[in-house]
Every structure is written in structure tokens, then in C-alpha cells.
Amino acid sequence: MNSDGFAPLRRDYLVDDLVQAARSSSVSATIAVQACQNLAETEWLLEIAANNSLVQGVVGWVPLCSPGVISILDRFADDTKFKGVRHILQGEPDEFFMLREDFNRGVEQLKQFGLVYDILIFERHLPKAIEFVDRHPQQVFVVDHIAKPKIKENLLQPWADGIRALAKRENVYCKVSGMATEADWKSWTARSLRPYFDVVLAAFSPKRLMFGSDWPVLTLACDYRAWGDTFRAFIAGLSPDEQERISSGTAREAYRV
């Protein structure tokens, strides 16, 4: 990809930008998810959530590999908007990072605090993600960005088989987000994304599928309103209850909002 295409991200995105973007697509509640792997950002996101009702929860970062992670989790535990934790697994040079013993010991602490773990991976990580999830059968997981299939290359496999296998784990939810940015940023269409949505809809059902925006990274491929319109077209044929579930109910259940 041409690095010039990243120009939309070369500025600060703050809460006023989020309010404007969400309003454009009639989104009334959001979960803010970490982008930096430091505690300062987690604290900053929680401060934003405390002062803006649009942000109903935060998925932050904590040093899960640290022996002292439980004391850090305990420090955040009283904040009712601290909903979960994410580590950017897709960026780790070690393909087996998610299977490390120290990392898994950290993840093992999350359930006592009622915290979700968001899984951020590429499709090639799906076999390891299944092994990772199976180590924590009582932990709630959310797969971000439908595990980033190779939409730009128009490839369904082996992603489809992998995501279907992961979906058999009832403690795993899936976020419909990040699809436009995995496609060709300039020429993607709803039709080109639809087969991938259909796979996760069948695999997870509306009960464990949720809307997500991946904003502001989304702006590389489209604006918030365009993505919201695309998503609503995907679910238009479902029943009103199923539409409400994917649009809001699943996220409220998974993140305890």
C-alpha cells in the first residue's frame, strides 16, 4: 500500500471528532479500544469515558506478561467503565506470542475482574487463536475485525474455515469491523464485503455478532456514515430483534454495558 494513503491518520483524533462521527451514523454509544501499548493511554481513555456518556466502556492495555499485572488490574477494577483488555497480537514478531506461558497467566487473571479480552489478529493466526481460547474456557473473548481476512485478494479460504472453527467456542463473540480497510481502500463495495459478513453471520449468529467501526482507522477507506450504511444494508434482511442484537445487544452483553 502506498504510504501516502495513511494521510487521514496523521492527526490527532479526540472525543469531539468521535461525537461528530458517531452522530453522522446515529450511533449513541461506543466502546473505546486501545491503540497504544502503554498504561498512560488506558488511563486517558478512562478519563474520556468518565466525562463523556458516548463512551460507555474502555478496552485498555495492561502488561499481561508482567508478574505484577494483577495489582494493575486491581487498580483499575473500581472503574465501572473498564470493560476489557487488548494486546496487539497482530503486531508481535513472535507468531506464538499468544501461546506464551507468561501471557496466558496474565489472561487467566481477567475473569476474576469480569473483563473481556479482545483478540486482534490476522487470519494466519486463527489456528493459534483457537488453541489460545481453548486454554481459557471461562474467559469471554471478542474477535476484532472478523480476524482480518484477505478481502483485497478476494480470498475466503482458509479464513472461512478458521473463523467457523473459532465460532464453535461459545465464549467467543465477533466484531463486524475493519472490513473496508482489509479491502481495496478506493474501490471496495458492499458486494465485495458481503461474502465475509455472511460467513460470520452464519458462524456466530446474531447472538454473538456485534457492530464495530474501527474508527478512526476506518477513515483510510471511508467515513463513519458510509460504513454504518453498509452495515445496515448487510443486516436489513434480518428480523428486527436480530438487527437490534447485532447493532447493540451483543456488545451490551459482552462488555456488560
Image (cartoon, rainbow, N blue to C red):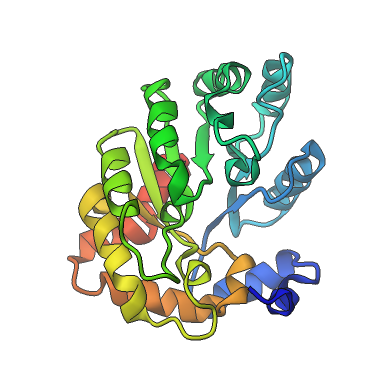
Position of residue 191 in the picture relative to residue 118 (left or right): left
Up-down: is 1 above or below 207?
Answer: below
x%, y% of residue 137?
A: 36, 22
Up-down: is 76 above or below 182?
Answer: above
| Quarter containing the N terminus | bottom right
Up-down: is 111 above or below 54?
Answer: above
Position of residue 61 in the picture relative to residue 215 (left or right): right
Up-down: is 177 above or below 124?
Answer: below
Q: Residue at the spot x=78%, y=37% of the render? A: 39
- Residue 208 shows up from this direction: no
Position of residue 97 in the picture relative to residue 169 (left or right): right
Report which quarter residue 67 is drawn in. Answer: top right
Report which quarter residue 133 is drawn in. Answer: top left
Question: 1 and 54: which one is in front?
Answer: 1
x%, y% of residue 69?
A: 70, 20
Q: Residue at the spot x=52%, y=59% of the render? A: 29
Q: Residue at the spot x=72%, y=64% of the render? A: 15
Position of residue 67 in the picture relative to residue 102 (left or right): right
x%, y% of residue 82?
A: 62, 37
**Residue at the farthest bottom position:** 187
Number of disc labels: 0
Q: Residue at the spot x=60%, y=60% of the render? A: 54
x%, y% of residue 139?
A: 43, 26
- Residue 233 shows up from this direction: yes
